Image (cartoon, helix red, strand yellow):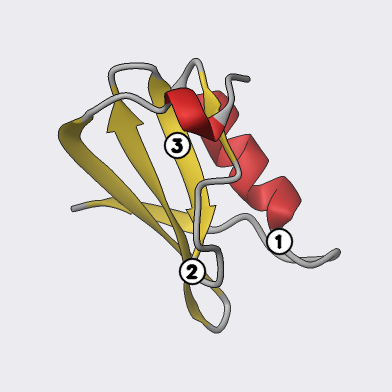
Amino acid sequence: MSSTASMGTMTGQRWVAFGDSGATGTILHTDDGYAVRLLADQEPRGVYPTLEVAKSAMHASMPPGSNWPEFREH
């Protein structure tokens, strides 16, 4: 995981994570990887090397017991 300060430029790909109560966060594809941000966050929580790792990080950031979110590319 790299720091958010080194988050590269966006490539245009974005996924929105939807949990049981609606949208919970986003994953942005950047030059450095996949940046994970919950809706309440001001900055990404981290940048991950693959989309699958970013999805797992998103789920791990959700409240305990949360179902796996549905990811929709936008």
Measured as percent of width and height from the top left, residue 29 is found at 30, 31
Q: Residue at point 40% right, 20% down?
A: 33
Q: Residues within 10 Å of mark 3 (few under 14, many from 20)?
A: many
Task: Determine which residue is flagged by label 2.
Answer: 39
Q: Horizontal and vertical percent for residue 49? A: 50, 15
Q: At x 68% / y 63%, what residue is drawn? A: 67
Q: Are marks 1 and 2 in contact (CB under 8 Å)?
A: no
Q: Amino acid at mark 3?
A: Ala
Q: Residue furthest front?
A: 5
Say which of 71 and 35 sits in front.
35
Q: Which residue is the extreme one toward the right?
A: 64
In x, y percent, where is residue 4?
A: 52, 33
Image coordinates of residue 55 in percent, x first then y, are 54, 39
Q: Nearer the viewer, residue 12 or 9?
A: 9
In this picture, residue 19 sits left or right of residue 73: right
Q: Which mark is residue 62?
A: 1
Q: Is residue 10 visible?
A: yes
Q: Amino acid at mark 1?
A: Met
Residue occupied by mark 3? 35
Mark 1 neighbour density, 10 Å: few (under 14) some (14–19) many (20 or more): some
Name the mark on residue 5.
none
Q: Is residue 67 left or right of residue 30?
A: right
- Give amino acid for label 2: Leu
User: Which numbered disc, 1 or 2, marks the residue closer to the eye?
Assistant: 2
How many numbered marks appear? 3
Q: Quadrant of the N terminus?
A: top right
